[in-house]
Image (cartoon, rainbow, N blue to C red):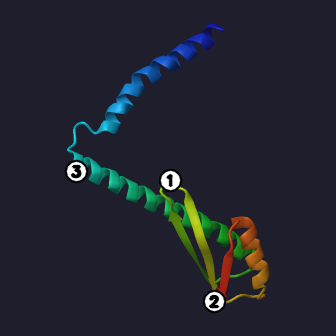
Amino acid sequence: MEKTLRAVIGIFVVSAICTPLLKLKKTDAFLPAFVADAVTQTDTSDLELQMKNACRNTIGKVVDDIMNSAGVENYEVEADVDMDEKYCIIIQEIRINIQQTNNGSFAEIEAMAKERLGVPVKIVCE
């Protein structure tokens, strides 16, 4: 009981010390307004780009697994990824360009991809 009480008090003390420091960081009191706006915009665009790239990489890995299990070797994945103002990721379209396949079961591959990714997938044979 005593250890639990000490842990709770310790957490409270740490949060009491950190809260004012976090508020100081948000105010950008040491930067002129135009510099603070530029830094915020740059950070936001970098964050958006990183999140979109991470989403595309994840989609690519899932498609790689699907294509490997289907025996397809030459393909290219295009993912149209966007973000709204609340930083929610919106996947508009996933397109898989297949150059060759051993068995030609595009409908089965498309169904597997749609099931695993949860969004419509378009397969185009080149």
Residue name at image x 46 percent, y 23 percent: 15
Label 2 SS: loop
Viewer-proximal residue, 87 or 95? 87
Residue name at image x 73 percent, y 78 percent: 110
Return the x and y of residue 70 as percentages of the image width and height: 76, 78
According to the picture, the residue beneath numbered tag 2 turns out to be: 99
Vertically, is 71 above or below 29?
Answer: below
Return the x and y of residue 104 as percentages of the image width and height: 76, 88
Check disc 3 and give the amino acid type. Phe
Residue 70 seen in this snapshot: no
Which mark, by number, is residue 86? 1
Residue 95 seen in this snapshot: yes
Pointer 2 or 1: first along the chain? 1
Q: Are marks 1 and 3 in contact (CB under 8 Å)?
A: no
According to the picture, the residue beneath numbered tag 3 turns out to be: 34
Residue name at image x 43 percent, y 55 percent: 47
Residue 94 in which image quadrant: bottom right
Label 1 SS: loop
Real-space Cα separation, disc 2 to disc 1, in angstroms: 38 Å
Viewer-proximal residue, 111 or 87? 87
Work out which quarter of the rendered image holds the N terminus and state it.
top right
Residue name at image x 54 percent, y 68 percent: 81
Label 3 SS: helix
Q: Nearer the viewer, mark 2 or mark 1?
A: 1
Q: Nearer the viewer, mark 3 or mark 2?
A: 3
Would residue 44 be found to the left or right of residue 8 on screen? left
Q: Are marks 2 and 1 in contact (CB under 8 Å)?
A: no
Vertically, is 58 above or below 31?
Answer: below
Q: Residues within 10 Å of mark 3 (few under 14, many from 20)?
A: few
Real-space Cα separation, disc 3 to disc 2, in angstroms: 50 Å
Pointer 3 or 2: first along the chain? 3
